[in-house]
Image (cartoon, coloured by chain):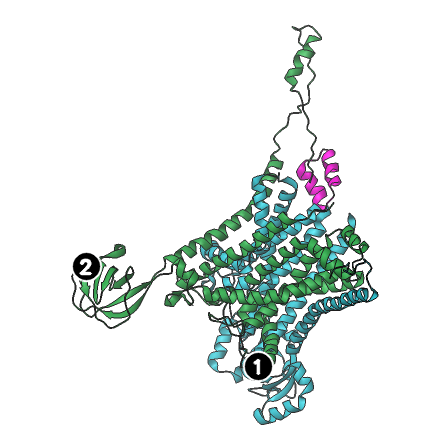
Amino acid sequence: MNKTYLRLTVRKPSLNAPIVASQSDPNAKVPVQQMPDLRRRPRLRELTINGFLFLCGFLSIFITFGIVYELGKESFLFFRNRQWSSTNKPLAADINPEQTVFEVEASGTPLQTDMNYRIEGEIIHIDAIDGTSLTVQRGFDDSQPAAHRAGLTLEAELRPNLLEFITGTEWAPHNGKFGILPLLTATLIVSGVAIVVAVPLGLATAVYLSEYASPRAHNTLKPILEILAGVPTVVYGFFALTFMTPLLRSIFGADTVNIYNMASAGIVIGILILPFVSTVSEDALSAVPRSLREASYALGATRLETALRVVVPAAFSGIAAAIILAASRAIGETMVVAIASGAGPNFTFNPFEAAETMTGHIVRISGGDMSYNSVDYNSIFAVGLMLFVMTLILNVISQRIVRRFREIYE
Amino acid sequence: MSILRKRGDFVESEQQLARRHARGRVVLSVFQLATLIGVIVLVVLLLTIIKNSFGYSAVQNEVDPESLAVNGIPLESLTKSQLATILQANVSAGLFARFEHDQPIAERDAANIYDLIQEHVIAPEVEESWNLYDSLTKKDQILVLMNEQYPDAELQFLSWVNWDFVRSQQSSHPEIAGVRTAILGSLWTISIAIFFSLPVGVAAAVYLQEYARDNFLNRIIQTNINNLAGVPSIIYGILGLAIFVRAFGAFTSGVAFGAADSSTANGRTILSAGLTLGVLVLPLIIINAQEAIKAVPNSLREAGLGLGASRWETVWAHVLPNSIAGILTGSILAVSRAIGETAPLVVIGASTFIQVDPDGPFSKFTTLPAQIYQWTVRPQGAFHNIAAAASLVLLVLLLALNATAIVLRNKYSRRL
């Protein structure tokens, strides 16, 4: 909005005083006419209202800060979290608190150097392994070195590190498996299927509605697509489970297609984001000025040639932004996958198998009565942080594309 | 396909032109088909829900309701004292004492006692249910199957969505379970969400449109709001869990106000749910309200300021009244999204099973979509029927809201 305000510049009454005085005897007591005080007074009410409105606007910053802070804090705790799992490897002989080299039995799972192990309450750090002989640092991580009896088994420390988090192919936090890949691949497969369904359909719909449809067809079809966008996602979940899955199973065979599968969830999410793709793309297409179309027709191009070679390229930035936003939606979509895509992480690339996505995992884990400070509680924040970062990056990219590549026609 | 062919001359042959137009027609029909798919899916979606909401069921009653009739008067029309007698005669003394403990029988009304008889005495159980399509086309097979497998059961054509379904409370028996608790929970949470986010959202929109100078801080706020609108709803659920349920648990559970009972002290209350939904719809309300305020012509503001009104007076007397229709429409659309939200509420802990109506912001809660989710994930077929019925109720609720939005838009939008 163009803000223009009338600025009143008012001289202070004191500046007028000599002028008034000069008209008569300077020593005479003149009844000076009271000038209205036109100085800008602090308007308390306006200031308060302004402050309140600003605070309301600023609240959004607080919300973002809250999201980032909570996700970050609990994720940090997730990576600090440690668990112990038995290696079944017993000490070969009694050891005293000072001993840093000792023997273990050959049975049990192999030990690794540079890892922490626990014997009773004491934590040791293995520096070197020579056959069954260990060189260790005693009393690691502020634990007290103590004497231990032969036969006690070592427990290995399980601690999520960033590398394992990103590359590990197994996700079972309470069993010390911290690889997010199964959840990530499932999310990407489901969103991939959704995009494959939504983008061609959405674009074709957008081109039809913007370039071909008569006003009457447009006014009938548009609200129907908006209804499609307004159906709650949990209803789509029900639809996926009771219609799409049986349909897929009857087409591809019940042996190939699991009762819970990613393909069904993906297709239904594709339908769910279809109105989104088509509406945003159609807005971009309608923003292309008529003159471009007319120029194309004048050169002898058919309607199709004009639509696909002139209008669509001109609206490309808007269409790209729509697709990226739709992808971000698909990644964050929860209820359809929670219902139709199956419970339990599964590292697979077969869309007909059941696999849990990141969002599905969060819903399943938090559905029950979860105790705070448990691995599960912290893990949903780590997964949530990953989800937040992914969708945020996509949203920012789409906003950038719109801003940078927007063609301005005058 | 180049428009000018290399034929030595620039004249296109008739066939080539015809081919180009034919291609145009083929692709057009592909486009039309693609558009039609969206419509078809919507129809199929509705049909799937309707199909599962009606149909034949094999119902097995523990006690035949006709045998409970007194002097030939059917159970429904009996008086309260007669019903109480029947209830006492047919349930164990311990169970009757529990009813008495929950709420004295003398204080209950006839409908309530009738519900108790339905649930505990007659105890109808759906052995198997068929969807509407099968019920209409394969009635013979169903009858054969009935005689083989459930000779004692009665074949009833049930409409799963009916007045009793809307009116009754949650139950572990799908045939008598209802969505009343869930509807009340939805209304409570939504009211709290609106109460919080509508004033704040409109105020923020007014600030950004009318007051904010184009400086770094305000640009950050605007970008931030746009980004918040794209954050997945489940992230808001996690935020609500960490902040409203856990950090402010003392307030959201009502302990700080002395209003809590021991069952809700963990902060998983209507208040937490409402605030979470409020935070979730806030960016949407802000963006929609901004659009509405943007549409107010500048001349109105200039006229107000020119007559000596302060900025707030201009906003209050001219900008807001002229944008109220747009603000309301946008807010209703945002709210109808909030009503359908499930994931954040499941994360902050919608109760799986409550039979008590919520009676305040510190009650446990369940909402309509959360209820649909919980029924959908159950394996028994009859729960899918009531999930479909609840979906129908939810869709009708949303349709009513959206119709209100359209009416509002039409009523107020002609003033400018």
Determine if residue A324 is in view: yes
Q: Which residue is mark 1?
A: A253
Query: In the image, B415: left or right of B57?
Result: right
Viewer-closest of A163 and B257: A163
- Callout 1, which amino acid? Gly
Is residue B293 shown above or below B193? above
Q: Dominant secondary structure of the magenta stretch?
A: helix
Q: Which residue is mark 2?
A: A100
Q: Position of residue B230 (x, y in %)?
A: 58, 55
Q: Position of residue B132 (x, y in %)?
A: 67, 81
Residue B405 placement (x, y as % from top left): 71, 58
Residue at coordinates 63% horizontally, 46% vertically from top-left? B205
Judging depth in this view, the residue of A73 and B103 nearest the camera is A73
**For marks 2 and 1 on the same chain, the one whose residue lies earlier in the sequence:** 2
Determine whether, in the image, residue B64 is placed left or right of residue B255: right
Q: Secondary structure at mark 2?
A: loop
Q: Position of residue A92 (x, y in %)?
A: 18, 69
Quarter of the figure with residue B377: bottom right
Where B374 sits versus B315, above or below? below
Neighbourhood count class around disc 2 (C-alpha, 10 Å): few under 14, some 14–19, many 20 upward: some
Query: On the image, which quarter does residue A133 sit in?
Result: bottom left
For badge 2, the amino acid type reads Thr
Q: Colour of chain B?
A: cyan
**Circle 1 — which element?**
loop
Chain ID for green: A
Is B315 in the magenta?
yes
**Looking at the image, do the residues carrying marks 2 and 1 touch, with CB atoms under 8 Å apart?**
no
Q: Quadrant of the C terminus of chain A?
A: top right
Q: Residue at x 51, y 61 (%)?
A: B269
The magenta region covers B295-321
